[in-house]
Structure formats: structure tokens, C-alpha cells
């Protein structure tokens, strides 16, 4: 893992607005203390899994993926995960996934449930591969 210092006044929201495909998720803490120490701006590499309204799981290039969404995500997570290095101990994120998991995904977890289908065109589940992040430490800047 590589750590590079940035100016403490770096505007993470402006970066997100400038390139939302590249920086898809900004998590800013409003809590005080140790649990509210970090802001995270996740950096995507273009990889994704998506559960479409037709029930098919697809990759970013619309290639179909066999099986259920959570099973496909688990396979990808297992294939891409890395061992934690001792240098990673002080940071809250070292790569992973940004997830959108809607209520409609419950139908794949518990087949007895019949949640309504989305009508707004958004996927019931989306996983964006984010191998890096911009991290702001609110304690040290």
C-alpha cells in the first residue's frame, strides 16, 4: 500500500463532483472522537457487478455472470482480496468494494420473499471495485 500526503484542505466533495465515475462514494464523518476520525473518498477502477431488474448479474461491460449477486460478489472478493500488512494498521481502508444493496436483493437471499421490482431503472444491487481511496484524518489533517 502506498500513502501520499495531501493538503489538509483538499476538497473531497469537489473531487467527487469533478469525476463521479472515478470517485463514486464519499463518506464524511460528522461524529467526534475515534470513530469519527476519517473521511473516505473511494477511487473506482471501473470493475463492477450489477444485479439488473431482470434478475441477471452482469459485469461493467454487460457480460452476464452465473449465479446470484452475493455469490458472484463473494467469488470476486475472494479472488481479489489481499493480506493485511502491518503498515495498514493505522488506516481504515486499504481497498475493497462500494456496495449499494437495496431491499429488492432480499428476494435472492430468501426466495419466499417477493419484493416489488424497481421501476426507477436503478439496479437492486451494485458493487463497484475500489482498490484505493483518498483518506482524510480529521485528527491530524
Image: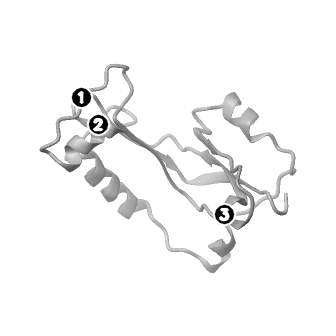
Judge whether 83 appears above or below 122 on screen: below
Disc 3 element: helix
- Image mark for residue 35: 3
- Which residue occupies 86% across, 51% down? 8
Do callouts 2 and 1 mark residues in contact (Cβ within 8 Å)?
Answer: yes
Residue at the far front in the pictured view: 32
How many numbered marks appear? 3
Do callouts 1 and 3 mark residues in contact (Cβ within 8 Å)?
Answer: no
How much space separates mark 1 and mark 3, taking CA atoms?
36 Å
Disc 2 element: helix
- Report whether residue 58 is seen: no
**Residue at mark 1:** 116
Displayed quadrant of residue 84: bottom right
- The foreground one among 113 and 50 is 113
**Residue at mark 2:** 104
| 129 sits to left or right of 113 | right
- Which residue occupies 66% across, 63% down? 35
Is tag 3's residue or tag 2's residue first in the polypeptide sequence? 3
Q: Dot 1: within a 10 Å radius of its alpha carbon, few (fewer than 14), some, or many (20 or more) residues?
A: few
Quarter of the rendering occupied by the C terminus: bottom right
Query: Where in the figure is residue 41, as x and y percent of width and height?
Result: 66, 46
- Which residue occupies 80% across, 39% down? 11
Query: Where in the figure is residue 99, as x and y percent of width and height?
Result: 45, 46
Amino acid at each position: 500500500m502506498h500513502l501520499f500526503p495531501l493538503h489538509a484542505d483538499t476538497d473531497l466533495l469537489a473531487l467527487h463532483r469533478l469525476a463521479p465515475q472515478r470517485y463514486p462514494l464519499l463518506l464524511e464523518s460528522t461524529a467526534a472522537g475515534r470513530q469519527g476520525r476519517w473521511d473516505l473518498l473511494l477511487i473506482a477502477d471501473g470493475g463492477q457487478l450489477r444485479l439488473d431488474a431482470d434478475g441477471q448479474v452482469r459485469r461493467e461491460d454487460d457480460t452476464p455472470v452465473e449465479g446470484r449477486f452475493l455469490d458472484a460478489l463473494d467469488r470476486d472478493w475472494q479472488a481479489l482480496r489481499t493480506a493485511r500488512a502491518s503498515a495498514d494498521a493505522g488506516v481504515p481502508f486499504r481497498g475493497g468494494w462500494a456496495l449499494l444493496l437495496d431491499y429488492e436483493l432480499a428476494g435472492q437471499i430468501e426466495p419466499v420473499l417477493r419484493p416489488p421490482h424497481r421501476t426507477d431503472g436503478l439496479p437492486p444491487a451494485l458493487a463497484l471495485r475500489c482498490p484505493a481511496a483518498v483518506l482524510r484524518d480529521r485528527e491530524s489533517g
